[in-house]
Amino acid sequence: MYGLKDLKEKINITETTVECPVKDCDVIVERQRNSFKKEKRFYCPEHKIFISPSTFEYQNESDNLLWKDQDDLELFKNIQRVKRESRMVRDNSEDALTWNVFRFLEKNQLLEKVMSAILGISIKSPEIIYWSYSQKEDTSWPDLNKARTYFGEQIERSSEPDIIIKSENVLFFIEAKLIASNETVPTNLNDAKKYQEKDKELYSQLFKSNFNTVAVQEKKYELLRFWLLGNWIAKEKNLDFYLINLVLKEKEQNIENIFGQFIKQDQNKRFIRITWEAIYSQILKHGIYLNDSNKIIEYFKNKSLGYDGFGNLQKAFSIV
Ligand SMILES: [Zn+2]
């Protein structure tokens, strides 16, 4: 895995070429444009990566993963069975980041401590569900599937929170972001109207604005779906519901107010922004004595976001 320590601070990008970002490497490859392509002409054989002007992809998924003991890899394989799409090989993959951080918390029994400290509530017996894969059920989480069916979603295009945490008292959906923003819109507007039409009473209990305003005009389609489905499940199971937007400290700073103006919140249902950096601080506080902690701390410190338009390397996290 290559991070800030291994990568050139600046790479040379021309109209037609780009250089390998790994320090001391002379390989120059063809410049690729638009959607990322894993082709030989973009490949550095020395470092086994496919290169674009802004980022790179590893040859194998496991090159981007911190945790690959046998039980990790088995769980990872099971997740892939139900996960909708996988982009774990890209250096700036939010999925790889999510796995590396949350699997660390889970393996080291830190989930309860860390999330309780950040959110200021007590979380009891948390069960973590990665991209809808329930370890208990060994399949996609049945309660989520019920909600998907209720709102008429087709499984292949269904809502898939990055992380679900089910605890004794609260259900959490965590939508994790690294590069991407929260702006998403429906591809098929007529189809998407079902979210408001299916259960008008519930919709009006949860939202202050209509579907068109929230999902289309304000481009908060993904958050709308999570707020709706999560609350529906929580209601069925008599739990509180927290929708968590996990972002970089620098990004989406006003998202609680922006999305907050369209939804109805109370003590039992809340929308909260938290940051990767806050999780890092909690790991420093609670996890420093653990075997794996050096690995995850180094990972945070060394994580890059790839290169900006001028070929300058960007640090992922605002930490020292
Ligand atoms: Zn190279």
Image (cartoon, rainbow, N blue to C red):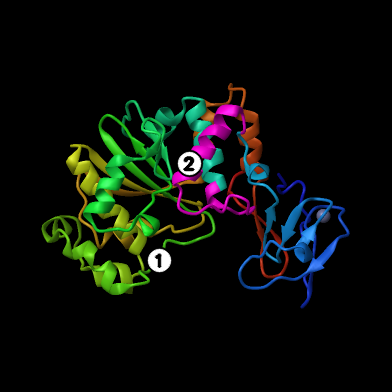
Question: Which element is circle 1 on?
Answer: loop
Residue span colored magenta: 68-95
In the rendered image, residue 85 lying in the magenta stretch gets the answer yes
The residue mark sitting in front, 2 or 1, is 2
Query: Given the image, on which type of amino acid does mark 2 rest?
Result: Ile
Write the residue at 58% across / 26% down. 288
- Dividing the picture into quarters, in which one does residue 194 lie? bottom left
Q: Is residue 101 above or below residue 168?
A: below
* Residue at 56% across, 32% down: 72
The answer to whether the residue bearing label 2 lies less than 8 angstroms from the nearest atom of ligand 1 is: no
Q: What percent of the width, then of the height, locates residue 145?
A: 30, 47
**Label 1 CA crowd tier, 10 Å (few <14, some 14–19, many 20+):** some
| Residue 11 on image: x %, y % | 78, 63
Answer above or below: position of 255 versus 118.
below
Where residue 316 sits in the image (x, y, percent)? 61, 52
For the residue pair 207 and 192, the one nearer the viewer reads as 192
At which x and y percent is residue 251? 49, 58
Which mark, by number, is residue 184?
1
- Dot 2: few (<14), some (14–19), or many (≥20) neighbours within 10 Å? many
**What whole-number distance in Å separates the C-alpha atoms at marks 2 and 1?**
24 Å
User: Residue sitting at 18 percent across and 43 percent down?
Assistant: 235
Earlier in the chain: of badge 2 and badge 1, it is 2
Side of 216 relative to 276 (left or right): left
Query: Does residue 200 belong to the magenta stretch?
Result: no
The foreground one among 91 and 132 is 132
Q: Quadrant of residue 212?
A: bottom left
